[in-house]
Image (cartoon, grey):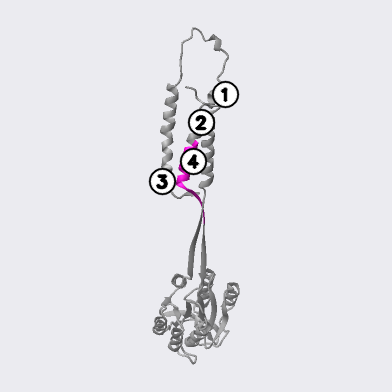
Amino acid sequence: MQFANPTYLYLLLMLAPLIAWYVIRMSKMQASFKLASTNAFKGKSRGFKTYMRHLPFALRMIALALVIIVIARPQAVDSWEESETQGIDIVLALDVSGSMLAQDLQPNRLEAAKKVAAEFITDRKNDNIGLVIFAGESFTQCPMTTDHKVLLNLLNGIDFGLIEDGTAIGLGLANAVNRLKDSESKSKVVILLTDGSNNRGQIAPLTAADLAQSYGIRVYTIGAGTKGMAPTPVQTPFGMRLQNMPVDIDEKTLTEIASLTGGKYFRAEDNESLSNIYNEIDKLEKYLINVQNVTRKQELFLPFALLALVLIFVELILGRTWLRNIP
C-alpha cells in the first residue's frame, strides 16, 4: 500500500498535543471535598462507567486519524513489466583446415575454437544460430536454429578431415551469407574464424564481403594463431610429427572484410584472447529488449472514511446518552 498524498500524514502529529490537552483538562475537572472519615467508602471500587467516560474522546481521536489517512489517499498498487525480446540471427563460420590442428592454442586451434564457440552459444539463449564449416570447400554443419542443444552436438562433432583440406575463406563466408540473406531479423551477424589465407574456392573473400554488405550482414573476423611459428602436426614418412610451421594469417583481407560490413577484426594468439574476443562480440551484439511498465492503482480510502463516520456517530450517541456529562 502507498499514499497518493503522503505529506498529509504529518497531520497525525497533531494528535499528541490534543491528547495532552485532554489529560490536563480532565485532571483540572476532578471535584474534591473534605470528609471526616473515608471508612464508608472502604471496599468500594470505581464503576465501569468511570473508565468508559474517556471512550468518546478516544473514538474522536481515532476518527480524526482515519480522516487524515483518507486525505492522504491510500492506494493499492499492482505493478509488472511486459518485456519483448528479439534475438539476433548469427552464423558461425569455422575453419576446419589442417592448420587448425596447430598447438599454439590448447589443445589445438580447432578444439579451442569449438570450446569458446560452445560457451558463446550457451549464453545466447534468444538467438537463432547456424554453423558453417569450411576448408577447401564449405558446407552447412547446422542450419539456423534456436535449438541450441542440437547445435552444440553438431559443433562438438566437428573434426579435421570432414571436408577436403585447404582454406576457402570466400566460399565459407558466402555460404554463411546465404544462410542469412532471407532473415527478417533486424540484426544479422557472421562470426568467421580462420588461421590462414584464402587459397581455394571460386569466390574471393572480398566478393563475399560485398555480398554480405548488400544484405546488411555484419561480419566479425577472427585470426587464430600466434605470431611467428607454431607447432603443427605434419604427415611424414614416419607418421604424424609436430613441426614448427610459419603462421600465415591474411590480416589485411580479414580487416577489409570486417570494415566493409561494419564489423571488426580480432587476433587471437592464445586461448584467453580468443575467449575475450567472443565476450567482446557478445557485448557488441546484445539482442533487443522492449520493456513496458504497467501500473494499476486502486483507491483504498473508502473503508477508512466509512469507519471514521461510524466512530463519529458512535461518539455522538454515547456523549448524549449513556456517557453524557452533566454540568
- The residue positioned 58% from the left and 75% from the top of the image is 151
Question: What residue do we see at 42% from left, 34% from top?
Answer: 16
Quadrant of the rendered image containing residue 132: bottom right
Circles 4 and 1, Cβ within 8 Å, touching? The answer is no
Q: Is residue 75 magenta?
A: yes
Q: Position of residue 300 (x, y in %)?
A: 52, 48
Query: Can the viewer see residue 273 in this picture?
Result: no
Depth order, front residue of 233/155:
155
Distance of label 3 from label 1 (alpha carbons) = 40 Å
**Span highlighted in magenta in the image:** 62-78
| Closer to the eye: label 3 or 2 | 2
SS state under label 2: helix
Image spot of residue 108 (x, y percent): 51, 76
Residue 237: image location, x then y, percent: 55, 87
What SS does tag 4 mark? helix
Residue identifier under label 3: 7
The mark found on residue 66 in the picture is 4
